[in-house]
Image: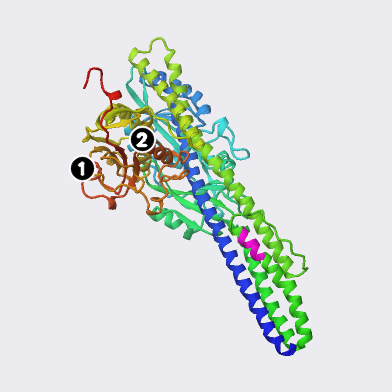
Amino acid sequence: MILALAPPMAVLSLGTTRLMLTTLQRQADVTLDYAAEQNVVAINRDLTSLRTLVEQRTEQLERAVGAAVADGAVGDLIARADYAAAGERLVSALEPSHASMITVLDARAVTVARATSPKAFGDRLLWLQPRNAAGYVTDLRPRARAALAGRTTSGVIVLSPAALEAERVTPGAAVAGLTKPGDRLSDQAWILLATGRETEERGLAMAALLPLRDTGGAVRGVAIAARLANRDAELANTYHRLTGRWMAMCLDRTTVVGDLPTDRRTVIGEILARDFLSPVLAQGKRRWIARLASTGIDLNAAARPMRDINGVVVGAEVAASPLTETQMVVDRIRADAARLETRSLVWLLVWLAVGSGVALLFAGLAARLILTPIRELQVGARRIGEGDFSYRLRVRSRDELEQLAREFNQMAEHLERARDQERLALIGHMASGIAHDIRNALTSIRGYAPLLAEEDLPPDQRREFAAILVESTQRIADMARDLLEFASGEQTKLELRAMSVDEYLEEIRPQLERELRGSNLTLALDLNCPAPARIDPARMNRVIFNLVSNARDAMATMAAPQAAHRLAIASRCPTRPGRVPERAPSAPGYAEIHCSDTGPGIPPEMEGRLFQPFTSFGKDHGTGLGLAICKQVVEAHGGTIEARSPADEGPGNRGGGGGGPGATFVVRLPIVAPGPEDKAPGTQ
């Protein structure tokens, strides 16, 4: 009887073992997919942080240089043709702005002042940058003409070797072991490619072009301030400190700044793989890849196109982090599982060969040595899949099972550490966004407060500057209040008053025009809803101005000039509620505010997550809480907010938006009859 049962029991034992191994491998695949997905989400956010860091550098240039020339003294020197003195006066602005160069062109497009070399002027190198075999350089003429017309622009530019040759290295910008103060700036931009036979002599720079006015307010020229990115180790160190990841900025496919790990001495001069960057450079698309082989190190990398101040793709921004450690652990688990399955087959042959008594003994031993540890592995895999990365296996069999358990525990440790790093990166990203918004307000305060102390300041300008200071401090206070309310989860407290939507929009029209000043966007107000609603104007301003800011930033990323874009704000009083989400409050009708733009639109994958916290798209800075706070404020009013794509709307429903795909945000507020407390004294 025992002899007859031995073979079936052995086959049953082997089948059970294979089933458990298959389950374990599936759990390993799920774990790897989870780790990869989390890494992609994190690296996408950190790629946005790189763009924000670059924008902060250009804003710093714009603010510092603008403050240095605000008094009109440099403009007066240019008007008197005292060009050397003008260059000497601009030297003081180099250090606070961290600029590599500050150069002034007059209305004839002739260089009349250089901060890095005050005695060198009279050329037209920046107006007509020589185009040679070095490749594409940015045409600064359209932006210079805009500055001469009184408009300020900023962004990334590519400088020619000849333009860099005329500038000198400042004390704060010298690279140890390469350049010293007084050397030509072209020496610092020069990069020997990894091939050892070619060089990159152009300069990638963050720049701002500002109108240069005299004390009478007349535009006397354009100030061009630029910070060279080539070999800027401080930029890479700051990004790594904020995100814990590596970065690179490429001019075409050549890395000019960054700290990507490589098997060479430095990544600067590396030519990144063609199959990695070709879709980015040729088609302007984002690119994901599991292995960036150009650097000789396994990386999980992301890239996005980098456009210059004219919207031309000149290179790419790259963010990278390692994912191979987790994958290698999972691969070792799979290999150990395969060896374990082979070993089980060998045990089956032994059972069938030895006979009944020995087979039963081996079957019991196999159940103890193999099945019990595998059950514990299943429990561990299930716990890891549920997010409990602190679970550890305790298997002491001194064979492949013990090795498999060690690999499993190592994988859990890696995932637990990755989760902690993800939390720290999230905090850093949020802190960076908050600091960005607060820095903008503080820069306005720091720039305009000293001007109020000037005795000869005209009263109109004094009132204007005072209003800007009040508005900036109120913006900081509102931001702090919204963040505290969002973090505490308390219901938003409102100070409501009955007013029509048209009345509210007309009231904030001057603020909207001031918000869009300098962006060259066309603002259109279409007021068609005199019906009353209960509105807290201060809190509703946070909603409207957040939508306007998002639309402006989204349209600024497109290649077309901003003058071709349009921002339309319209009010509507529909005869029926229309398409209202399921949780919309019951009310006789809704007053609608449509905010439409002609930007790139909303990708389908983002539509379901726009109003979730820490979700950011199109706007490369901020906390990721803007739309979440908007939703909170609108719902406190008893209303709803939603985003529409062009496919959701019929003709004429976009509030007058222009061409382009665009996006429309619709804020719905319940229409109410004014209560007694809202009526003026003496009314019935």
Could you tell me residue 307's position as x and y percent? 41, 45
Residue 410 position in % (x across, y down)? 68, 58
Q: In the figure, 304 relative to 437: above or below?
A: below
In front: 408, or 576?
Answer: 576
| One can see residue 210 in this view | yes
**Residue sitting at x 55%, y 51%:** 320
| Amino acid type of the residue tagged 1 in the rendering | Thr
Left or right: residue 593 compared with residue 327: left
Note whether 458 is above or below 131 in the view shown: above
The residue that label 2 is drawn on is: 637
Quadrant where the C terminus lies?
top left
Q: Quadrant of the N terminus?
A: bottom right
Which residue is identified by label 1? 575
SS at circle 2:
loop
Q: Tell whether label 2 touches label 1 (CB within 8 Å).
A: no
**Residue 125 in view (yes/no):** no
- Tell me the kind of residue under disc 2: His
Position of residue 231 in the picture relative to residue 379 (left or right) = left
| 492, 118: nearer the viewer | 492
User: Counting other residues with Cα less than 10 Å from the Cα at mark 1, is it few (<14), some (14-19), or many (20 or more)?
Assistant: few
Residue furthest to the top in view is 455
User: Magenta part mainly helix, strand or loop?
Assistant: helix
Q: Which residues are magenta?
A: 377-383
